[in-house]
Image (cartoon, helix red, strand yellow):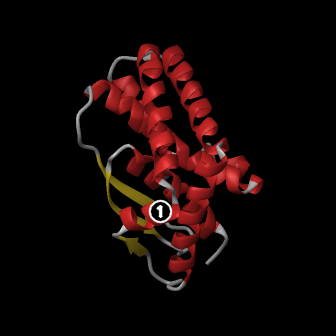
Amino acid sequence: MSADVRATAYHEAAHAVTGFALGHEIRCVLVNPIKGVRYPGRTERVVSGPGHPALLSEECAIVEVIGGLAEIRHDEHWRADAWHRDDDLKDVQERLRNTGSGPMRIDAFMKRCDEIARELLDDEGVWAGIAAVAAHLETTARQRPDAPTRFMNMGRVISRAIPQKSLDQIARVIRGYAAVLNALR
Ligand SMILES: [Zn+2]
């Protein structure tokens, strides 16, 4: 076991909180405290509800990018590798490539996503909420250091940790930027 558990907890908490704010169903969050595993954490989201599919995918890009940034933000020590080894970024880039975006557009898109996610994390209320959810994930996962822990009740955990007005603000910010990102791709 190592400090990775905390980084993973912040990473998954950021995915779960932003996804939940947008009305995505959080099926499961997994935190694996065993060192050296391919996936130390995972957040399974189901995207539903109304919305233009293209714009929905912009919302999802922000939700995906924010995990690695929350890891970086909670501890500067992670700056060196957390960002670059982040598979989430590769997934977003690949999706953009598959829909015909060229390298310069992808670059601009990723840069803007990064700025939007940082802006969200810089909000005191949003950060406090993510930290509270991360603390729950970390504390619970550390109770079973030899096996992954699955969290099935994230909606309840998030609702307790974050006031509705912070969740509404997250949704407002992300939806507000989705159209901006859509124009970049
Ligand atoms: Zn992730």
Q: Is residue 138 visible?
A: yes
User: Image height check: is 102 above or below 49?
Assistant: above
Q: Secondary structure at mark 1?
A: strand
In the image, 158: left or right of 122?
left
Q: Is residue 39 visible?
A: no
Spot occupied by residue 14 in the image (x, y as percentages of width and height): 52, 52
In the image, 152: left or right of 33?
left
Residue located at (63% from left, 36% from top): 119
In the image, 25: left or right of 113?
left
How packed mark 1 is, by other alpha carbons closer than 10 Å (few <14, some 14-19, many 20 or more), is: many
Front residue of 85/182: it is 182
| Mark 1, residue position | 41
Spot occupied by residue 90 in the image (x, y as percentages of width and height): 47, 38
**Quadrant hosting residue 153:** bottom left
Front residue of 121/163: it is 163
Residue located at (51% from left, 58% from top): 162
Spot occupied by residue 88 in the image (x, y as percentages of width and height): 47, 44
Residue located at (56% from left, 57% from top): 130
Spot occupied by residue 105 in the image (x, y as percentages of width and height): 49, 16
Mark 1 within 8 Å of ligand 1, using the beta carbon? yes
User: Image height check: is 13 above or below 46?
Assistant: below
- Quarter of the image with the C terminus in it: top left
Front residue of 12/126: it is 126
Give the residue type that dot 1 points to: Gly
- Quarter of the image with the N terminus in it: bottom right
